[in-house]
Image (spheres, rainbow, N blue to C red):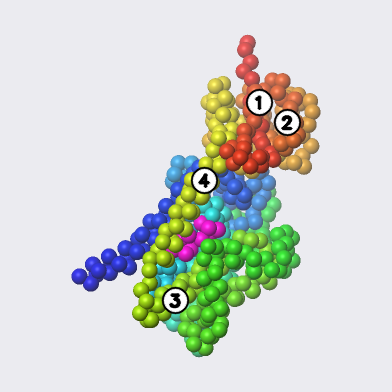
Amino acid sequence: MTELKLWNSENKALVLLLWVSALILLLGLGTRELWGAETRWANIALQMLQSGDYFDPYLKGLPYYDKPLPSYWLITATAWLMGGLDNWSLRLTSVIAAWLSIWLIYLIGEQLFRKGTGLIAGWMLATTFYFIFWARVATADILTVCGVLAAVWWYWRGPDDTRLGRYTVFFLLLAATSLLKGLIGFILPGLVLLPHVLSENRWKRHLNPRLCMALLIAGLFYMVPFVLSHFYGAPTYGQSGLGQVFRENVVRFFQPFDQFGPIYTYLIYLPVYTLPWAPFWILGLWLALRNWRQTEPNTRWLIWSLGLLFLFFTASGSRRSYYVLPLVPFAQLLAAWWVVRRIDEKRAAGKVSGPGWKKGFGAAAALLIVVLGIIYPWTNLGGGVVPFSAQVRAEASKSAPWNQWRIVMVEVDNKLPMYLQNQGAPFYYVQETQDFPREGDSATLLAWLEKTSGQHWDPQRTIIVAQYQKADQLPLNYLAADHQVITTQPNNGERMFHSRDYGSVAFIPKVTTP
């Protein structure tokens, strides 16, 4: 009877949280076209699938090893399981990571704080606008958040446990997280847990041979993708995976070469990225600092952890708004601590806590569903790269099966390749810096292609795709003499806000009659 009652209360509340979270994360996910940084993951994964080379990442035909391989492998594996690379298979790993993150922050909150803290923290994270926004974008950022939370959760299941198995799982989680975006997979959990490890001289207990053995196992695991890339990648690739790890994680931290945000970047973006619940963690921080000696040890640990994460990201010379994402779950956990404390104080004073919090979470969830699941996808309808690609496929297929066409991308829009894939030969990319014919005729361009690529190009089976600025004339306009011209049309959002600055154009050979 007790177990049945437990299921009807706590477990039922968790199931509701996870179901609503899944709805928020999945509704309209496949409707929105590629956006921002996810075009890089789409293009690299696509070239892996087209070429069969999973050890040398290329972006539009050029080596691009700025992230470790496993984040691309997750996408290609999902694409294989789902029958192809599209919006769903591209973003699904990020969505699953976000869903697991909500579950993990629930588990951490329920384990370390008063009953109900984890549930409220989970609802806050599930209804945090920017967390959900980035969860629906195919990058490695939410994967990193999930890995950090998994390592923290595992540690707190037995913070004084010194068995080899516990150490090994912990460090394997750190290694796996570091293989998704970079070495912050090791650094961030270390910073989060450092205050607790240092307290009560706990670190002395963990200095033992088993920890060193677990570190060695995790280090070997971390090296596997780089070793495979070295032995099975192309000898002419030209970039070192480990060299890029050093450049992207160490050099960028001390001598940034891009993304120069001001030193106060995260003072602005941490509150912004935790909306609409930012006021509550700020109140929780103020209350805990004001009553520091009376504050519970786990809350003090949480504040120290947030402070160390904030200092680490601020100390880096490379700053960008979404780098603050790993702080968001911990900030919402602090907010939930404050809320539960307030509810308990009201109950202790004999005041009945009303349904205000439930209504607030319900309203926030409904708003996210409407904005991200309905309105935002609607703005992508009616035009853009998706119907453009469909029209190109339809027109080309009138002359020959789609998989028989070769496609040349000239200074192409990053969003386009995934939507034009045809399970045929890999795309050929012409870079901005190449001296391709800006004037002439189609024969001149094909002759240049054959000379440059060393490949034969059938003029009746080659589609040329290019990008153009809104105010400029179409590039390669001389191809219009013997090619059908198709251009992108503005979508609903672009028509509403008049925001289309560039478009794509495809030149399809006209059918010649004998």
Earlier-in-chain disc, 2 versus 4: 4
Disc 2 secondary structure class: loop
Pointer 3 residue: 342
Measure how far apart labels 4 and 3 are at the Cα level.
35 Å
Against 414, residue 450 (above or below) is above
| Residue at image coords 53%, 62% | 276
Of residue 415 and residue 458, the one placed in the foreground of this image is 415
Mark identifier at residue 474: 2
Residue type, label 4 = Ile
- The reply to whether dot 1 and dot 4 touch (C-beta < 8 Å) is no
| Residue at image coords 57%, 54% | 139
Q: Nearer the viewer, mark 1 or mark 3?
A: 3
Mark identifier at residue 485: 1
Measure how far apart labels 1 and 4 are at the Cα level.
31 Å
Residue 457 % position (x, y):
66, 28
Measure how far apart labels 1 and 3 are at the Cα level.
65 Å
Residue type, label 3 = Arg
Earlier-in-chain disc, 1 versus 2: 2
Residue type, label 1 = Val
- The reply to whether dot 1 and dot 2 touch (C-beta < 8 Å) is yes
Against 384, residue 359 (above or below) is below
Residue type, label 2 = Leu
What residue range appears in magenta?
Answer: 123-132
Pointer 4 residue: 375
Q: Quadrant of residue 110?
A: bottom left
Measure how far apart labels 2 and 4 are at the Cα level.
32 Å
- The reply to whether dot 2 and dot 3 touch (C-beta < 8 Å) is no
Res 421 seen here: no
